[in-house]
Image: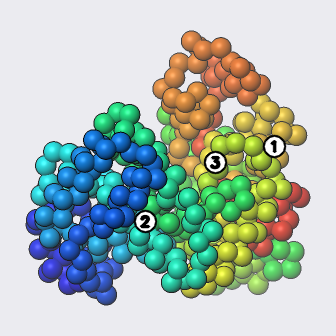
Amino acid sequence: MTRRRFEELLKVTGRIAPNDTELYIEDLEASEKEILPKAFLLSVLDLNNVPEPKRDILFRALEGINAVPELVELSHIMAKDAIRALLRCDANEFVQPKPDCLTGFARDAYAFLYSQLCVIEGRRALRLRGVPEQYDRDIPERMTRKQLKKFVEKDDITFDDYSWDMNFYCCDIFLLDRFYFIPYKWGGELEAWRNIRTNAVQAVWKAGGLVRRDGQLNGVNGVFDEQAFLTVYEETEESVTANRVLPSGYVSNETVALNKTEWKKALREGDFLLALHIPGGEGYTPERVKNSCLLALDFYGKYYPDFNYVGFWSESWLYDEGICRILGPERNISRVQRQFYCFPTMEGGGMAKREVLHDSDADYTQLTPKSTLEKGLFKAWSNGERFHTTGMFLLSEEVPDVGAEPYR
């Protein structure tokens, strides 16, 4: 599709395509006359036991969308590119589209019907790569169930978290043993170096970061340090001198000099990683982390050989060392945390409140703690302590050593 044609379509539909879509779609064309086969939508509604009155509403929305050929054409182009965009990590923040050419319920329903088109395109792409059906079985369906349940019960077809859900609808997320995996492009403030002789890994922070004396980034959780230090990063042909990042999740005011004859860069900006996401439930152990990551390396190496995934990345409140102090070293949360190379982020304690209290704005003083973790958190909060969403990376070379704290 030419840029000119793309812009012509947007004049009709409004800016519903993700930013920079036009940079990637020159090889794509669409001649379809409908956004979604009616038979496909019927099968989805049958599978989810959607009652007749609700079906009629969705079918009328489908007809309204199909009556706008420019929207149909653009939808197919967007869907074809969405799967590739998630792989190249250029469209992780999908925004729920509401076309200007539609009104009423059809405008609200467009994103859901478009998501079902992405299911078709996503599965087509998987089969072309040779990925067996077992890997995407019930992946998009679990989001479809949630969405249609909300529609049936609340007459609301809009999404609560469209960006996250699109990973499922595009069939670009996989549950391998205990954890979900999604492609991720590294763009963080740090880089990692590996010792050629010992295999030890040392992360260093880039230049210009303002860090509090406690090793957290200045300003996180609204806390500022008048004596915060500025990180340095100096590279020559022979060496790199920079502030150390401690595997426990802090930036040190101590600098380290890495001789390039002894150290090679192991993680740099632009590298592809696999984002590890943690579903709720049992089995959050080092053993399951190791097995899941080994399965992921094998899966992506076999079916996505055109990408060189060098390891894993994640951000979570579970990686904050303060949580380990509450729980003690033998709890699984603490044991898993020690397998990763952790680092600070600018995300504060909102995730901890959201995950534990189910509301980032919850007033813990009005609640009764029910677990060891809640008791510890409530006591820490009352003492003025703060928690942090912390990042981690796990390089592919260390996956076999998970369980033995490879970075500690």
Please report whichever mark, 1 or 3, sits nearer to the chain's N-terminal start: 3
Q: Secondary structure at mark 1?
A: helix
The image quadrant of residue 105 is top left
The image quadrant of residue 297 is bottom right
Q: Secondary structure at mark 3?
A: loop
Label 3 CA crowd tier, 10 Å (few <14, some 14–19, many 20+): few
Amino acid type, residue under disc 2 in the picture: Val
Residue 129 image offset from top left, x and y in percent:
54, 83
Q: CA distance from mark 1 to mark 2?
A: 36 Å
Q: CA distance from mark 1 to mark 3?
A: 15 Å
Residue at the image position 52 percent from the left and 76 percent from the top: 126
Label 1 CA crowd tier, 10 Å (few <14, some 14–19, many 20+): some
Amino acid type, residue under disc 1 in the picture: Asn
The residue tagged 2 is: 119
Residue 85 image offset from top left, x and y in percent:
41, 71
The residue tagged 1 is: 332
Could you tell me if the residues under marks 1 and 3 are in contact, i.e. CB atoms within 8 Å?
no
Vertical relation: 397 (above or below) 313: below
The residue tagged 3 is: 279
Q: Secondary structure at mark 2?
A: helix
In this picture, residue 385 sits left or right of residue 325 = left
Amino acid type, residue under disc 3 in the picture: Pro
